[in-house]
Amino acid sequence: MKVPEKSHQLWRDIVTGSRAFELRSLAAKMVLGSLILSVREHPSPENIAAGVDQLHAVFTKNEHSPSIQDDLKTIFG
């Protein structure tokens, strides 16, 4: 599965913590945990966009990893 564009609403939902998913990728879990805390502390549009950029980059960089592929299916179907 290809990594959806950053403009997909689920990226924003994930980094704001409004939607939660059980992820398999350790890298994604670690980055996401940090991003959720950061966005909750400073929920500005710029901080949310930066969080989406960071999480999207992790998924894009590791797109061929089996755990990332599983996470993409879990999140985006």
Image (spheres, rainbow, N blue to C red):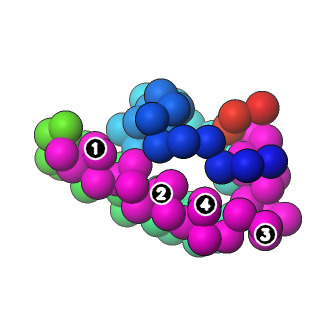
- Amino acid type of the residue tagged 3 in the rendering: Ser
Q: Is residue 58 magenta?
A: yes
Q: Which residue is mark 3?
A: 65
Q: Is residue 72 magenta?
A: yes
Label 4 near label 2: C-beta < 8 Å? yes
Rendering quarter of residue 73 = top right
Q: What kind of secondary structure does the magenta stretch mostly adopt?
A: helix
User: What residue sits right under mark 1 in the picture?
Assistant: 48
Label 2: how many Cα within 10 Å (few below 14, some 14–19, many 20+): many
Q: Tell me the residue that label 2 is attached to.
A: 55
Q: Give me the residue at 50% from left, 63% from top.
A: 57
Q: CA distance from mark 4 to mark 3?
A: 9 Å
**Pointer 4 with pointer 1, Cβ within 8 A:** no
Look at the picture and state if 5 lies above or below 59: above
| Mark-to-mark CA distance, 3 and 1 | 25 Å
Of the residues under marks 4 and 1, which one precedes in the sequence?
A: 1
**Which numbered disc flags the more N-terminal residue, 2 or 1?**
1
Q: CA distance from mark 3 to mark 2?
A: 15 Å
**Kind of element beneath mark 2:** helix
Mark positioned earlier in the residue sequence (3 or 1): 1
Q: Which residue is mark 4?
A: 59
Say which element carries label 4: helix
Per the model, the C-alpha gap separating discs 4 and 1 is 17 Å
Q: Position of residue 39 (x, y in %)?
A: 26, 47
N-terminal of the pair, mark 4 or mark 3, is: 4
Element class at badge 3: loop
